[in-house]
Each structure stands twice: as C-alpha cells, then as structure tokens.
Image (cartoon, grey):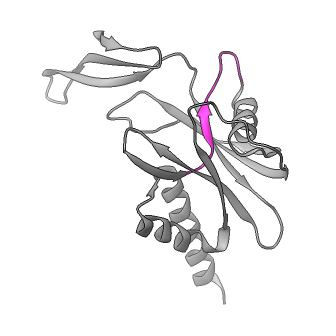
Amino acid sequence: MDDERVCGTRWLSLHEKVVRRGDGSEKRWTYARREGTAGAVCVVAHTGGDSPQLLLIRQFRPPVGREVLEFPAGLLDDGETAEAAALRELREETGWTGTVLRVGPCIPSSPGMTDEWVRMVDVLLSEGGDAQPDGDEQIKPVWVPCADLSQALESFDAEGVMIDAKLWSFAAGMAFAALAERDAAP
C-alpha cells in the first residue's frame, strides 16, 4: 500500500494511504500516526480486599478543551516493556506503585483515525508516595470505589468532566458482569 507522510511533529504525523475497497476501487485514507514511541499503556490501578477502589486521574486535555477522568496512562519509552511503563506512569502521575497482575493485548484506540495502540495493564496497588508529573501536567488523583464506579462516572459527567472511552467501557463491562452474576444466582 502507498503510504505518504503529509506533515508532522515529534509526536504525531498525518499520513495518507491508498486502500482498496471491497469493489476493487481505490481511495486515499488520511490518518494520524503516533511518532517516537512503541505504543502506550493504560493502568487499571486498584486496591484489593472486600471493597476495592480504583485509582483514576483527572486532568485537563487540550484537544477536547475540558478535564477528563481516565486511567493513569502514558507512552512507552524506547526499549521499555509494558509492565515497566505502567509502573513508571503510575508512580509519576499518582505517586503509587504496585504489582503488575496482567497485561492485555495491543488494542487500537481509534482505528479509523490513528494507528495508536494501547495495552491495558492490571496493577494491584501496594504503596503510595509523591507524584512526579511532567511539568505541563496538572493531574489530580481520584479514588472511586469499584462498587460505585458507574454512579461516580455519571456524577463526573454531570459536572462537565469528560469520561475517557476506555474507562467508560471498563465500567460498562463491570456492570454487565454484575448483572450476569446476579441473573445466574439461584
């Protein structure tokens, strides 16, 4: 396939690619390419026990012009594993560390618009400390009880805080799992 870089910066470039349609005709597809990284991680950080809580972050995101509630996340550094990147980003953004329990597959974030992918990393939290965000980041850690996640997200939305798609999907999955468990009970 013909792939041409139209313009770009250090972290993002615009590309056009010739793609063949189902009827055999061709069209040009414009998309964004993530530059300077091998991918990204999204950290599902939580406490254990009978009443687990999620550690989320709230930060202003210039592309949408609003605060967004999301999982801690970030780009992989050159040669870095998903596990190492997840623990690094978690510590930088929240001050917490923990144990990686599971790393998910590469999932595209918006496959019609960008080649960016992310791995969801499940981390059991163990110890808190001081956050060390990048100089331009204004991150506020937010604790939410897992049992109240859907209600909490609705409250944040009502305040005008946008909810990241990965977080909303996670909450929907938890809600569906709870319904299935309830319906399967005798």
Above or below: residue 127 compared with residue 148: above
Please provide the residue range marked out in magenta.
70-80
How far across and how far down the image is residue 98, in percent?
83, 46
Q: Does the magenta stretch include residue 73?
A: yes
Above or below: residue 52 compared with residue 30: below
Image quarter in which the C terminus is found: bottom right
Q: Main secondary structure of the magenta part?
A: loop
Q: How many callouts does the rendering have?
A: 0
Instruction: State the image quarter where residue 82 is shown.
Output: top right
Residue under the point 83% across and 49% down: 128
Residue under the point 72% across and 64% down: 53
How far across and how far down the image is residue 16, in percent?
26, 17
Q: Nearer the viewer, residue 155 or 114?
A: 155
Q: Does the magenta stretch include residue 29?
A: no
Instruction: State the image quarter where residue 152 is shown.
Output: bottom right
Quick check: can you spot residue 41? Answer: no
